[in-house]
Structure formats: C-alpha cells, structure tokens
Image (cartoon, rainbow, N blue to C red):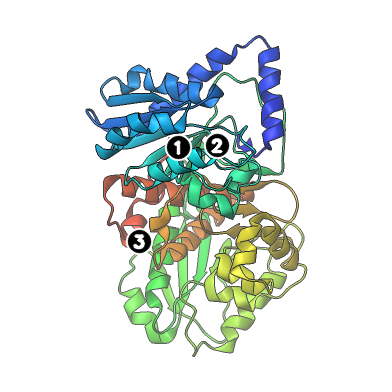
Amino acid sequence: MPIPVISVVQMREWEHATWGSGQTEEAVMRLAGLAVARAAAKLTGPGDCVLVLAGYGHNGDDARFAAESELLARRDAHLVRVRDPEAAMAEIAPLLQKQPALIIDGLFGIGLNRPLSAPWIKLIREINQTASPILAVDVPSGLNAQTGEPLDDAIHATHTITFGAVKEGMLKTSASTFIGRLEVATDIGLVPCPFKTGLNWSMAQDFLRYPPPRPATGHKGTFGHLVLIAGSLGYHGASVLAARGAQRAQPGLITLLTAENVYHPVAGQLQSVMVRPWAAEMELPDSCTAVAIGPGLASCDLPEAVREQTRLLWRESALPIIVDASALEWLPAGAVPQRAVRVITPHPGEAARLIQSSAAEVQANRRAAVGKLSRRFGNCVVVLKGNQTLIGRDEGNCFINSSGNSFLAQGGSGDLLTGYLGGLLAQPSLQTDPLKTICYAVWQHGTAADALLAARPNWTVEDLSGVLGSVGAGVA
C-alpha cells in the first residue's frame, strides 16, 4: 500500500508506539543502518572509498550501523564520529581529498529545529564543495524536515533515504535542492503506521502483478480501442511517440487521427496503428473505449473543428478522455458527465496558465494546484508532472510518484506518457480503478527512465519508448 506523508510530530508518535510494543530502539536503528548500507552498496562498487559521518543521537547511530554492515565490507569505508565539527575536520579533510565515491551524511536527523552554529555550517559547506555523491540518512543535515527550509545551510544530498515515511517538509520546493533523489525505507521494525493522510508516497510494491494477467480467451475487442488525436505541421513526431507509447500499453486497437499535411510522414512510421487524417466532422469508431488528445497539436494552422471536438468530448462523452499539451488550453471549465474519467497532464507552466497563476506559485504548493485544477475541470484527475509527479483530484487521496529522473526532461517524454496512459485506460479491465491505472502509468514511465539511466547516461525518448512497460514491479 502507498505510505502516508506525515509530520515530524507524527513520526515521533509512531516511534513511541513502537517502543511501547516492546520493540527496542537499537533493533530499529540496526535495521535502519542496514537500509542505508544497502543503498550505499547500490551507489558504489568494490574497493570504492566511502566516508561515513556519524553525529550525535540516533541519526549518527544509524550511520554507524551502516558503516559496520557486511554489505560495505568490500568497500574502503571510513567512519568518522563527529562530536566537535572543528576537531573532526582534521580527520575529515584528508579523506575528502581522496574524493570518496560516496559520503554518508549522518550528522543530524529530523529532530534538528534550531539554526546551526558557525563551525557546523563551515563543516557542511566543506562537504558540499566536494564533487562526491552524498547519501543523507533520514534527512540532509541542516534541513528542517517539517518546514523544508535549511537552518542557515544544509547538506546538498544527491540521495536521501528516509525512514518509515516521507516527512512533510521533504516535499517542499525549497527542500528539493537538498534532498536529491528520495527513497523510503519502510521495513525497519516499526509497528504499522497509525496515521492516514490525504497525501501518499507510491512504492514499487503498490504495483506488484499489475496490470493483472490477461484472460487466455481475450481478443482485440477485449482490450479496448484507443483513439489518439495528435500531430500537426512541425510537430508530427509527437503523434508518433504518443502512438508508440500507446502500443506499449497493448490495447486491442489504436487509431491515430492526425493533420492531413503530416499524414504521410506519420503513417510511414507506424504499422499496427491505424492512421487517418482528421476531418471537419470527426466521428469516433463505435468500438472506441478511450480518447487521448494533445501531443503535437501546437501548429497555428489547426482547424477550429479540432478544438470544438475536444471541448465536446470533454463535456459530453462517457468515455475516458486524457488531455495533454496544447489541448489543455481548449478545455471548458465546469461539470462533466458523472463518473466519467477525465485526466489532464500539465507540467507546472501549463498548470499555472490554466489557473491564472505562476509556475513558481504552482511549485510552492503543488497539492493546492492539483485541487484548483481538478475543481475547475469537473473534478478531473490531475497528473501534475515534474519532480515527484503528483496525481489526484480536488478531494480524496493524492499520490506522489517515487520513480523517474531529470533525464525525463526531454522533448517527447510527455507525449509518450500520454499515449501510454491512454492505451492503459482504453482497456475495460483497467477502467475499474482508474486512479490506480494512472498512478501505474506514471510510475512505469519513471521506472523505465531509471532503468535506462542505470544502463547508460545518454538515452533518448526513442529509447524510452522501447522499454516502457517492460521494467519494474508491474512485470509478473
């Protein structure tokens, strides 16, 4: 199950409930240390220098147990117990000169809530000036886990492994510079989380054996028919990427309606997709089970009929409708048919334009932006893209995607996602829980990007289209 995002106070209550159950603090810290060591082992190789900085309190103990783990036995691990930052610097400085393959930051934990003294700030800045990757234990030292603000300064981690659940401040835009890639270690001996919140962190385990197996007697009609409305002069590649994304979702049929003046280059790149030029009076096939609109519809010579058809489908169709990119600007505000699935997939700039705001304001409170967008467009599901993509409606549970990396910031990445999402939602068996299907699509898109990055750093969106849907927990 997705894990709730909680406050620091709730985390402390959770810990106290665990101690009350008879579990010992040391047992939990050892498991936390094991989780840190496991993460460090993935980030390094045999013989690599790993510098472990262990400060006061439990956070330092977590780091110490990580350093002592057998998982790091084949690393050149150096544990430095930091009590006095000025004294410790004499030991740390020569180790920093070795350019460690990884620095584990266990100086301060989530209990820190007051500004640091000058010597601590100096130490943190010395660490930040290195070119070494940094793995933060629970929270980057110096960052307030509740507010997401640095206490004068904080460690700039490339990776953070937090324990139990994500703390509220870690999701603030102000925290993103310090957090880096965020992962959650849930199996550290705590009792089940006693809290439920409206904001949840999606995990790979949420998508085990999803999508479910297909029936052996299934046929093309069983798995739905997606209609894509995409592509215009100068932007025909977006329609091809969207179609390939839809193919990776494997609906029974895909029809792509595109501009007549790009029909030939689009059709020439697709074989199993039925490509047709759109007409002034577009009629959906009777077998259509979902519609995705938007990729590559940025040309200034688009006929008004395309915009009118988009508005009509959004207001009246009982089918799932997914809208992205330029088509977002055409959407009518107001109600949609009851129980109809409606999805929009804006990036922060598009979201800001839709609610007459700024991208900075959207990023400052992404949950509020999702609510405003959802309310404006008929309680639709909003996929607010970006680091830790947010998925939800105005009310009810909202989900934060845990996968993906900054190399998704390439032209065509969103087009691929729109097609993949449409291909999944076209399948009747995946329409029963549309929010889970949407969360899975976003998670799989990010997981595929992570797999590519692990293999090579210069992957392209075309590469992503080749592996989308084939990696991660969703494959049984």
Q: Amino acid at mark 3?
A: Val
Q: Nearer the viewer, residue 325 or 424?
A: 325
Q: Which residue is mark 3?
A: 461
Q: Quadrant of the C terminus?
A: top left
Q: Residue at x 54, y 89 (%)?
A: 303
Residue 268 position in % (x across, y down): 30, 74
Distance (Cα) linking label 1 and label 3: 21 Å
Residue 142 position in % (x across, y down): 54, 41
Identify the secondary structure beneath mark 1. Answer: loop
Query: Are the two marked residues, 2 and 1, in contact with CB atoms closer than 8 angstroms?
Result: yes
In the figure, 130 relative to 89: above or below? below
Q: Nearer the viewer, residue 343 or 27?
A: 27
Q: Residue at x 72, y 40 (%)?
A: 197
Query: Are the two marked residues, 2 and 3, in contact with CB atoms closer than 8 angstroms?
Result: no
Q: Which residue is mark 1?
A: 473
Q: Nearer the viewer, residue 316 or 123?
A: 123
In the figure, 19 relative to 329: above or below? above
Q: Which residue is mark 2?
A: 206
Q: Quadrant of the N terminus?
A: top right
Distance (Cα) linking label 2 and label 1: 8 Å
Query: Which residue in the rendered view is the most extreme toward the left?
Result: 47
First in residue order: circle 2 vs circle 1: 2
Q: Amino acid at mark 1?
A: Ala
First in residue order: circle 1 vs circle 3: 3
Query: Which residue in the rendered view is the most extreme toward the top?
Result: 22
Distance (Cα) linking label 2 and label 3: 26 Å
First in residue order: circle 2 vs circle 3: 2
